[in-house]
Image (cartoon, grey):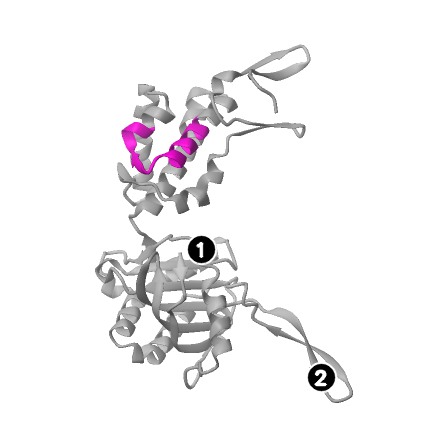
């Protein structure tokens, strides 16, 4: 997704963000980092970009729709207009992050703000602003060689293979809040949402990736929330629906909602009508549209296909994987207990 062959790291500023809950404040660096060392730049590229693996784009937003009221959008726009302002704007970014870090579980860390030129993302050459927060430190050993002795010391440092939090603001679609990629691995709890919601204030883009992802989630949720309680649906029937959904996304290039409903729900009008109704509730709950037609994103499918797994787990003894026609499996019970009967042609 990201090609660094022509990219150059133009500027980098680093500031220390203390614990807001302890009133530790922030430590502002007096000047940007010297990037003359080529090996340092290579290590930074690895640290900054390795974790961005899928084209899951977001855009800046604000509650009333006025992007100018989103501080991060304003900081980014100022930098894109004049990249020489990066250091000054990085101070505002650091202060803004500190103010949004009030929850006691949010960790202190080092904030790095960079400007990257000629970055290729999805075959488009763009400039970008990178914002990265390092919250965790790993222990490492270092050998120091002298004339007659080798000494062993240890220290704490940043593991360049583990980016805690990051975002790339891409200089495209300014009027729609730019295109933003994010990483947030350090903490999955609710308070950790401050990076995405409070600090950046971003929303998902209405694109092929998110439409593919949302329809996979919609189908899974529909089975759990509607079909199981209302139709008392058996596990193998659920597995059949999930398998047909998975096969549809796997085989077609362009999603067509009516075609999807017919294939996945076997043209059952009652269930399709329930699905359409549930879809509207899903849209209202998540406050984002769902398109009736779009190109299937292979990246979104690969990332979310695990939610379409058609597996029946029987106690701790057996798993039945349903990959095809669920009519070839039957459920029954006798004096020994419940059992499944499976029909097949070949064994391998």
Q: Nearer the viewer, residue 100 or 186?
A: 186
332 up-or-down from 133: above or below: above
Q: Residue at x 65, y 71 (%)?
A: 140
Give how far across and how far down residue 261 sits, in percent. Answer: 33, 27
Q: Is residue 249 magenta?
A: yes
Give how far across and how far down residue 328 sits, in percent. Answer: 51, 17
- Asked whether, in this view, residue 105 is left or right of residue 4, the answer is right
Q: Is residue 126 magenta?
A: no
The magenta segment? 241-260
Q: Which mark is residue 145?
A: 2
Q: Quadrant of residue 34?
A: bottom left
327 up-or-down from 114: above or below: above
152 up-or-down from 214: above or below: below
Give how far across and how far down residue 13 sits, in percent. Answer: 42, 78
Residue 192 visible in this rendered orientation of the protein: yes
Mark nearest the camera among 1 and 2 is: 2
> Split into 4 quadrants, where in the image is the N terminus?
bottom left
Give how far across and how far down residue 59 sits, in percent. Answer: 31, 57
In this figure, which residue is indicated by the disc labeled 1? Answer: 53
Q: CA distance from mark 1 to mark 2?
A: 39 Å
Helix or strand or loop: what does disc 2 sit on? strand
Q: Residue furthest top?
A: 335
């Amino acid at each position: 997704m990201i090609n660094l062959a022509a990219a150059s790291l133009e500027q980098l500023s680093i500031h220390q963000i203390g614990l807001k809950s302890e009133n530790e404040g922030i430590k502002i660096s007096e000047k940007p980092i010297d990037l003359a060392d080529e090996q340092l730049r290579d290590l930074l590229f690895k640290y900054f970009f390795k974790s961005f693996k899928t084209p899951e784009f977001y855009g800046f937003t604000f509650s009333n729709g006025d992007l100018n009221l989103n501080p991060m959008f304003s900081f980014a726009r100022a930098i894109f207009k004049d990249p020489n302002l990066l250091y000054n704007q990085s101070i505002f970014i650091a202060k803004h992050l500190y103010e949004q870090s009030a929850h006691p579980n949010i960790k202190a860390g080092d904030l790095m703000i960079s400007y990257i030129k000629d970055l290729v993302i999805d075959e488009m050459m763009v400039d970008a602003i990178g914002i990265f927060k390092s919250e965790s430190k790993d222990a490492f050993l270092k050998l120091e060689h002298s004339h007659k002795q080798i000494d062993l010391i240890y220290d704490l440092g940043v593991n360049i293979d583990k980016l805690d939090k990051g975002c790339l603001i891409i200089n495209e679609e300014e009027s729609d809040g730019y295109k933003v990629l994010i990483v947030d691995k350090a903490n999955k709890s609710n308070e950790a949402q401050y990076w995405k919601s409070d600090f950046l204030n971003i929303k998902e883009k209405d694109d092929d990736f998110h439409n593919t992802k949302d329809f996979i989630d919609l189908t899974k949720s529909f089975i759990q929330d509607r079909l199981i309680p209302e139709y008392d649906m058996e596990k193998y029937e659920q597995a059949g629906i999930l398998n047909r959904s998975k096969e549809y996304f796997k085989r077609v290039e362009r999603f067509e909602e009516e075609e999807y409903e017919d294939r996945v729900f076997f043209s059952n009008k009652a269930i399709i009508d329930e699905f359409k109704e549930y879809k509207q509730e899903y849209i209202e709950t998540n406050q984002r549209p769902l398109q009736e037609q779009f190109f299937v994103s292979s990246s979104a499918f690969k990332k979310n296909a695990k939610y379409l797994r058609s597996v029946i787990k029987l106690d701790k003894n057996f798993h039945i994987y349903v990959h095809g026609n669920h009519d070839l499996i039957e459920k029954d019970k006798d004096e020994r207990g419940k059992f499944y009967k499976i029909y097949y042609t070949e064994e391998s």
